[in-house]
Image: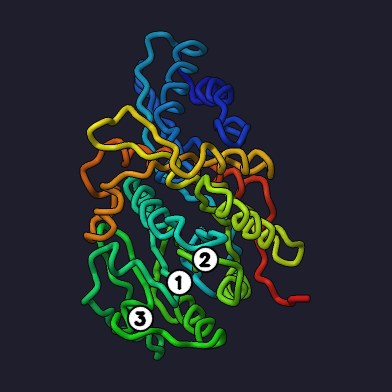
């Protein structure tokens, strides 16, 4: 005869694959109900976009059938309580559970493409996601999401005016390109650009988000420092190409976030434009910029390697046409971004479980 105690004991043998502890110890099992040979319960995931839910469902079913009742009918329901590195007392972006900076040492490596499709892949998995375009001098989000002519609205909250992000493809969007005519150059000194980033953090109504993806400008400058002085960044995703020049600059981005006074964890490194695959030869790979340079760099710095994104014409066409790859119709490209996002979200959960909360940078030496 099945009992709740027996079910709990059986499920205590099921490990959460990333966190290395069993589901019961992690308090991930809720609402157990037994009716004859049928048992149902809710499995609380660390993110709605969890890529391991099917594996955990099978592991739970097997544990109950092997250890409790081989005739059991097991119904596993899912909910999510997205893990976070935020403290309840933190004021800025209070409703945002994870702030992920997408960075690169140099321009031209496809950082904005990576940020946009990461956001879309996470949203596809059920997470609530925002995308902040922090590249003040070269904003890409309005073009990539097809919102070039749109302008955000304003709303009042407790007597203070807030910008309401645009929404497209289920993503909340904010960019300086939505506020300034694209025909005009943004000729601002560093303090003005930094002020705009603070405004995007403190005067935009982002609401409740599982992930806020921030498309950072290339390099290691004022805007990066302003961000980490304003909010506690969960971690950074480093984007590079296999090319030696890009790898040299990626090392600088890694070094910046690893500095003791900054100490923002690196979620992982993704290699963009890893190889060229022509549409008429989908099984061929041509390594135009070198082979596995990003993968080797990740191994050198002992960072998680989040995967390789191919150089495919449809990615460029989608970005230019306002329909990013994740909402296009190229299944091969979409799977590459899904696999990347899957590894990213797993490493975010691992980071939140094992590394102390990131602090806002207060003093720079």
Asked whether residue 348 is in view, the answer is no
Give the image quarter of residue 40: top left
Q: Which residue is mark 3?
A: 163
Name the foreground residue: 217 vs 247.
247
Name the foreground residue: 77 vs 200.
200
Q: Residue 237 at what x, y percent from top left?
A: 54, 53
Q: CA distance from mark 3 to mark 1?
A: 18 Å
* Callout 3 secondary element: strand
* Callout 1 secondary element: loop
Q: CA distance from mark 2 to mark 3?
A: 25 Å
Q: Residue 316 at what x, y percent from top left?
A: 30, 53
Seen as rendered, the residue at the extreme bottom is: 159
Q: Nearer the viewer, mark 3 or mark 1?
A: 1
Mark number displayed over residue 218? 2
User: Between disc 3 and disc 1, whose residue precedes?
Assistant: 1
Q: Residue 148 at what x, y percent from top left?
A: 24, 73
Is there a contact, CB below 8 Å, between mark 1 and mark 2? yes
Mark number displayed over residue 109? none
Mark number displayed over residue 135? 1
* Callout 2 secondary element: loop
| Disc 3 residue crowd, few under 14, some 14–19, many 20+, Cα 10 Å | some
Which quadrant of the rendered structure holds the C terminus?
bottom right
User: Between disc 1 and disc 2, whose residue precedes?
Assistant: 1
Give the image quarter of residue 16: top right
Q: Indicate how the structure is coloured in the image.
A: rainbow
């Amino acid at each position: 005869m099945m009992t709740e105690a027996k079910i709990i004991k059986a499920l205590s043998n099921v490990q959460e694959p990333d966190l290395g502890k069993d589901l019961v110890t992690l308090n991930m099992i809720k609402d157990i109900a037994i009716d004859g040979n049928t048992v149902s319960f809710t499995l609380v995931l660390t993110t709605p976009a969890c890529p391991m839910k099917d594996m955990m469902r099978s592991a739970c079913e097997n544990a109950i059938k092997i250890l409790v009742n081989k005739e059991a009918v097991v119904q596993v329901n899912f909910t999510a309580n997205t893990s976070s590195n935020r403290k309840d007392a933190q004021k800025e972006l209070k409703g945002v559970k994870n702030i992920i900076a997408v960075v690169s040492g140099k321009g031209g490596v496809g950082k904005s493409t990576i940020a946009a499709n990461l956001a879309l892949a996470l949203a596809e998995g059920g997470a609530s996601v925002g995308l902040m375009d922090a590249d003040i001098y070269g904003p890409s989000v309005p073009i990539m999401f097809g919102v070039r002519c749109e302008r955000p609205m304003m709303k009042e909250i407790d007597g203070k005016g807030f910008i309401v992000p645009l929404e497209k493809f289920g993503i909340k969007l904010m960019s300086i390109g939505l506020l300034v005519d694209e025909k005009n150059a943004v000729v601002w000194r560093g303090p003005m650009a930094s002020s705009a980033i603070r405004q995007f953090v403190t005067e935009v109504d982002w609401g409740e988000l599982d992930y806020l993806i921030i498309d950072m400008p290339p390099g290691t400058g004022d805007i990066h420092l302003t961000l980490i002085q304003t909010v506690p960044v969960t971690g950074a995703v480093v984007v590079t190409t296999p090319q030696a020049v890009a790898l040299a600059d990626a090392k600088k981005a890694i070094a910046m976030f690893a500095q003791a006074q900054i100490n923002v964890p690196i979620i992982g490194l993704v290699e963009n434009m890893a190889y060229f695959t022509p549409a008429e030869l989908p099984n061929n790979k041509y390594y135009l910029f070198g082979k596995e340079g990003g993968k080797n760099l990740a191994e050198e710095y002992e960072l998680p390697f989040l995967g390789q994104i191919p150089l495919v014409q449809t990615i460029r066409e989608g970005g230019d046409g306002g329909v990013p790859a994740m909402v296009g119709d190229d299944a091969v490209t979409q799977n590459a971004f899904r696999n990347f996002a899957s590894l990213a979200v797993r490493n975010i959960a691992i980071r939140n479980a094992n590394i102390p909360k990131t602090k806002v940078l207060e003093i720079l030496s």
